[in-house]
Amino acid sequence: MECGSDKVIYMDNNATTRVAPEVVDAMMPFLTDCYGNPSSMHTFGGQVGRVVDEARKSIAALIGAEPDEIIFTSCGTESDSTAILSGLQTFPEKRHVVTTRVEHPAVKNLCENLDNLTGHKHKVTRLHVESDGTLDIEEYRESLSEDTAIVSVMWANNETGVIFPVEEMAAMAKEQGIIFHTDAVQAVGKIPINLKDSAIDFLSISGHKLHAPKGIGVLYVRKGTPFIPFMHGGHQEHGRRGGTENVASIVGLGRACQLASEKMEEENSRVRYLRDKLEAGLMGQIPRSMLNGHKKDRLPNTANISFEFVEGEAILLHMNQLNICASSGSACTSGSLEPSHVLRAMGVPFTAAHGSIRFSLSIYNTEDEVDFVVDNMPKVIANLRAMSPFWNEDNN
Ligand code: PLP
């Protein structure tokens, strides 16, 4: 199949990222000649085992962890499930979970199904968010109780990029002996993370959000935190996650983490500059457009903008004709045209939530691409508004 990825302007990096060429190069030997099983006793397998350990070190280094605090999984979703179910099994007498209203479905849908999965009745507190997507830390403090087994709060939101104060929240949980998990799938590789002195017990990573392949994830488990495996099987990962390791992808993730360490400054300056230019260019030219999410406490690559009185799906189709890839906050993923639960939790009005577009950049975007989008989007929105029964010049 021809993908023609050179032709597209890819601004959907919170959905998935291009695998870095350096990552592909690092992986190739483990898809071809070096196919040994890392658990084998012979040298052929043993040398692959050493490469897995090297990757583990690179991943640990990116987040300020120890290599043996890294457990490989198949994806961010598996890491999230593993962490939350482990916390609940560790304290079977406790039935309370604290999370937020804006988690990714990996956490949201698990929390909705806990009673079925565990056979126990659980109480789940879902923290509110303000209109800018931030949390009320007092509401969080008050939500913690003797019955709370685990807190699961994302580090950065995938739709708005809003960053939550998870280190402060973890410290508060620790004071009460509560396990703290953070889904850091969107944060790792984009902003600095140092777990060395933090109280975070579990942290989830997904390879395909930071220029490694899809189908590889990590669960960080703090040394000393009780842990009960999700996948039982062989003795891989010191008995903490059964299943033969996805060696090539592990090597790829290790290389991606090295690159992320090297390019973090660039992500924080050049990508932020491009994102800000895009945002200012669009919102400066298009009337009735608004930013969803806190302006500052946000990932440097994400801009979620609502264009009132137009449908996000229609905007995406027109953008698609211009070879621009982004996401819509009203995606009918569940077959309904409900706006996203994140925007709803923020209280974004329906007319704005329906017309929201998430642009998420990466180090591979260029200024020319941003200029092209800024030059073309105003026409797209104006044409759609001209056809909208809800739009009239008085809205302007
Ligand atoms: N958590 C967040 C915040 C995400 O954005 C995603 C993917 O979009 C996931 C979890 C799931 O990761 P994976 O696709 O590796 O299962």
Image (cartoon, rainbow, N blue to C red):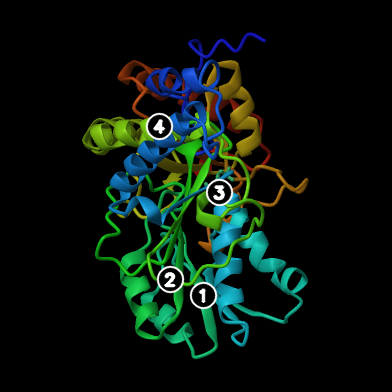
Earlier residue among tags 2 and 3: 2
Q: Nearer the viewer, residue 4 or 350?
A: 4
CA separation in Å, label 1 and label 2: 12 Å
Earlier residue among tags 2 and 4: 2
**Spot occupied by residue 106 in the image (x, y as percentages of width and height):** 61, 54
Q: Image point 46% across, 30% down: which residue?
A: 48
Tag of residue 225 = 2
Query: Is 73 left or right of 297, judged from the image as shown?
Result: right
State whether residue 290 is above or below residue 133.
above
Q: Please state which amino acid type lies under the numbered disc 4.
A: Leu
**Do tag 2 and tag 3 residues touch (Cβ < 8 Å)?**
no
- What residue did someone put label 4 on? 361
* Mark 4, secondary structure of its residue: loop
**Do tag 1 and tag 4 residues touch (Cβ < 8 Å)?**
no
Discs 2/3, front: 3
In this view of the protein, can residue 283 be seen by the observer? no
Discs 1/2, front: 2
Classify 10 Å Cα crowding around label 2: few (below 14), some (14-19), many (20 and above). some
Q: Nearer the viewer, residue 352 or 58?
A: 58
State whether residue 268 is above or below residue 386.
below
Tag of residue 150 = 1
Q: Image point 47% across, 23% down: which residue?
A: 27
Q: Image point 59% across, 51% down: which residue?
A: 77
Q: Image point 51% across, 75% down: which residue?
A: 150
CA separation in Å, label 1 and label 4: 33 Å
Earlier residue among tags 1 and 2: 1
Classify 10 Å Cα crowding around label 1: few (below 14), some (14-19), many (20 and above). many
Q: Please state which amino acid type lies under the numbered disc 3.
A: Gln
Tag of residue 44 = none
* Mark 1, secondary structure of its residue: strand
